[in-house]
Image (cartoon, grey):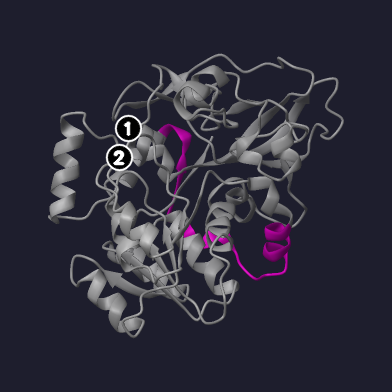
Amino acid sequence: MRALRWHGKHDVRCDTVPDPAIEDSRDAIVRVTTCAICGSDLHLYDGFMPTMEHGDILGHEFMGEVVEVGRDNHALKVGERVVVPFTIICGECDQCRRGNFSLCERTNRNRAKAEKVFGHTTAGLFGYSHITGGYPGGQAEYVRVPFADRTHVKVPEGLTDEQALFLGDIFPTGWQAAVQCEIEPSDTVAIWGAGPVGQMAVRSAVILGAKQVIVIDRVPERLAMASAGGAITINFDEESVIERLKDLTNAKGPEKCIDAVGLEAHVGRSFDSVYDRVKQAVMLETDRPHVLREMIYVCRPAGTLSIPGVYGGLLDKIPFGAAMNKGLTFRMGQTHVNRWTDDLLRRIQEGQIDPSFVITHTVPLEEGPAMYKAFRNKEDGCIKVVLKP
């Protein structure tokens, strides 16, 4: 089969690799009909995530048709359409029973690596380094899905791939980011980053009833898409984020702040941006946390910071004293996808939202390497890339 593989920083290739096979009785093999490049994949592309290995198959946002099932997998049948969440879940451990699916205690087959770095294991993830299990991803013609009797979302008749695909990651990620804010009707929600997750967070905050939603970015196409979804926009290249937020909130600051950027914040020539790039260049810092610093500074006292953006390692110069003295609440983590999918699937079917609005490019799998570059460099108005194996 053909698959997109990581061969090092900025080196993604479409290679021929062996087809996957059933390895466990709960497995399924899925023929991928549609997959996507996620913003989180760019952290791999840029070489910021540790424990990637030469030849790893990428991709954690995919769906398709079941073509084979293990003998103990009674939940799926050959021919069914499924979206595969990026979080691999057993459905039986303490964390799964609590609905904390991204913290599944059983699915990370490299749990010793995770425990050494994080103190405890997290769930296994598709196509996202060996610290999360080293599972081959879904930017491929076929994929083996472990624990497939629980790690799936069945797609009902009447929905296109494009409508259903994002149930595997960015839609529930944006939704969880907004839900973690516990939005009240009087709240202002400020969202840093108008990429795919930020766009889903905008729509989620609007659906959940925020008084006003504000998005901070600098890419015109992304700001225009956020505005179409109901957000007030701030272009940080053209105006002061701090001053504009003061104007929009009567100097009180937003009650809820969402970091939909993560470890690769781009903030031009601000002092802390230069500082982070220098520290990163000499390997004294892994992540660029400008957004976190700014959110802590502008958030209204007793407010909430929700962090769906991915961070990989060590952060420097975080104003934790400000966060403590302002009484801020931090809520963060990888997405508990299956906690949200029943509700979100219903909302799609009822017409509340069509997540396919975010798609700007649809290309064959073989064009994936070029689209990684275009997505990273924000070329040709690229916001969300869908691949067709």
Amino acid found under the numbered disc labelled 1 = Phe
Residue 224: give its label: none
Q: Which residues are magenta?
A: 343-366
Percent coordinates x, y for residue 325 in the rendering: 37, 62
Q: Are marks 2 and 1 in contact (CB under 8 Å)?
A: yes
> Vertically, is 298 above or below 361?
below
The Cα atoms of the two marked residues, 2 and 1, are separated by 8 Å
Q: Residues within 10 Å of mark 2 (few under 14, many from 20)?
A: many
Secondary structure state at the residue bearing disc 1 = loop
Q: Is residue 359 visible?
A: no
The residue closer to the viewer here, 21 or 121, is 121
The residue to which callout 2 is attached is: 287
> Vertically, is 197 above or below 40?
below
Q: Residues within 10 Å of mark 1 (few under 14, many from 20)?
A: some
For image coordinates 43% across by 32% down, the residue present is 366
Left or right? Give the position of 331 relative to 351. Answer: left
Left or right? Give the position of 239 relative to 145. Answer: left
Quarter occupied by the N terminus: top right
